[in-house]
Amino acid sequence: MGRAVLMIAFHFPPAAMGSGNLRTLGFARYLPASGWDPIVLSAQALAYPRTAPITVDAIPQGCVVQRALAFDARRHFGIGGRYPGFLAQPDRWASWWPAAVGQGLRIIRRHRVRAIWSTYPIMTAHCIARTLSGITGLPWIADFRDPVASSVEAANPYSVASQQRWEQRVLQDATRVVFTTPGALRTYAGRYPAAHAEGRLAVIENGYDEVAFAGLPDPPSKAGRPLVLVHSGLLYADGRNPAPFLAALARLQAAGTLGAADLRVVLRASGSEATYAREIERLELGEMVTLAPPFSNREALEEQARADALLLFQGDRFDRQIPAKLYEYLRMGRPIFALVGEHGDTAAVLRSMGSAELVPIDDVDAIATRLPAFIRALRDGQAPVAAVATVAGYARSAGAARLAGMLDGVAAATGHAIRESG
């Protein structure tokens, strides 16, 4: 048996949130190999806006999962989607806090927990962890992932102000604070120089789970068919806007450079299908561009495996973030047409891998110039792809090993005696 770590995560199966689940699941799956046994403290399913069936292999075998009562202020206490703002401090799931603390204390004593880990984007998870760490004296690793400002529900001023206060408390009190990108770490190092000087800030990137890639199909022969480009995930006007890409496609189609016989584009689970459908109709791209509904992560991977290349949209607004799907894209070994901010962390990773055609997301002229060349390289088998050995550093097993090393360090530095409360 390894040492127990209490992992506080709101998003966990059956919550229907892919990337939010996958980071926690990856750590839970691979930490035991480094001597740490995860015990996950999550919320009861009624708190989740959407749920999905739990497949047999979704939760790692042997992973202990405990759930505490939680409500969603919008759905359970609101009328017509409106609810008192003070109920969302620091977020809509603040009701999870009291029950989770009580349950967390029982878990800590029963399993002789040695460290606490909590993860964003639900700030209440960090509130629970800070409370438990304060009561027990256990070291606490706060997994911030992306900057807080990118996740706060801006329409609720109570939530915004509360999360800003809690950001300061977490950075002051957590034993370590982890981000997923160098850009996020640099931002917080500038904002909290003392935490940076004390060596409490670190990066553990998102990644891919190798087991998810077993048995995926090979792409079909390119002969006699249009090439297929796939984008999987949310698109939105501010930061991941596909409109310039669609405008470039329309220009190329009008010029006779590319048409439906040459190229098919699938925008899977964009989240704003009605908006993009109107634009596709206006540009007369209906035969070339398909808006497809969401489906499971496994089905998304199978679709990506059958694609000839993958699309990525990540504008300047998200320069300090890297979409979790990028690592799956890299492991998939398909060429990537990346519409990204030139100076962002996503572009830096892709350059280091030499695996993508990088184009500014809002430059219609550049897209219209470089997309045909990319398609020709695809057709000729000359488009760049990332080497599997290079991508291996982004496996979730590698990230879990880095987290285990951090847990080793904080547990050794602080000891593991549990204070008696009350």
Image: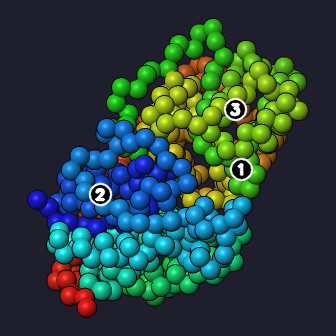
Task: Please state which amino acid type lies under the numbered disc 2.
Answer: Val
Q: Residues within 10 Å of mark 3 (few under 14, many from 20)?
A: many
| Residue 82, horizontal then vertical, whole percent | 70, 67
Query: Which residue: 23% across, 46% down?
Result: 61
Q: CA distance from mark 3 to mark 2?
A: 37 Å
Q: Where residue 291 is drawn, which disc sits there? A: 3
In front: label 3 or label 2: 2
Of the pair 364 and 302, the residue shown nearer to us: 302
Task: Give residue 236's mark.
Answer: 1
Task: Identify the residue under disc 2.
Answer: 65
Q: Mark 1 is on which residue type?
A: Tyr
Pick the quarter of the image with the C terminus.
bottom left
Q: Nearer the viewer, residue 308 or 297?
A: 297
Q: Residue at x 75, y 18 (%)?
A: 260
Residue located farthest toward the bottom when viewing the structure as drawn:
422
Residue 126 spot, x, y in % from top left: 43, 74
Measured as percent of width and height from the top left, residue 154 is found at 69, 70
Q: Is residue 85 above or below residue 29?
A: below
Q: Would residue 392 be visible to someone looking at this image?
A: no
User: Residue drawn 45% across and 80% down?
Assistant: 170
Q: Is residue 368 left or right of residue 299?
A: right
Near mark 1 (Cα within 10 A), the count class, few <14, some 14-19 or many ≥20, is some
Please state if 244 lies on the left or on the right of 120 as rendered: right
Closest to the observer, 326 or 171: 171
Q: Are marks 3 and 2 in contact (CB under 8 Å)?
A: no
> Of the residues shown, which amino acid type is indicated by label 3?
Leu
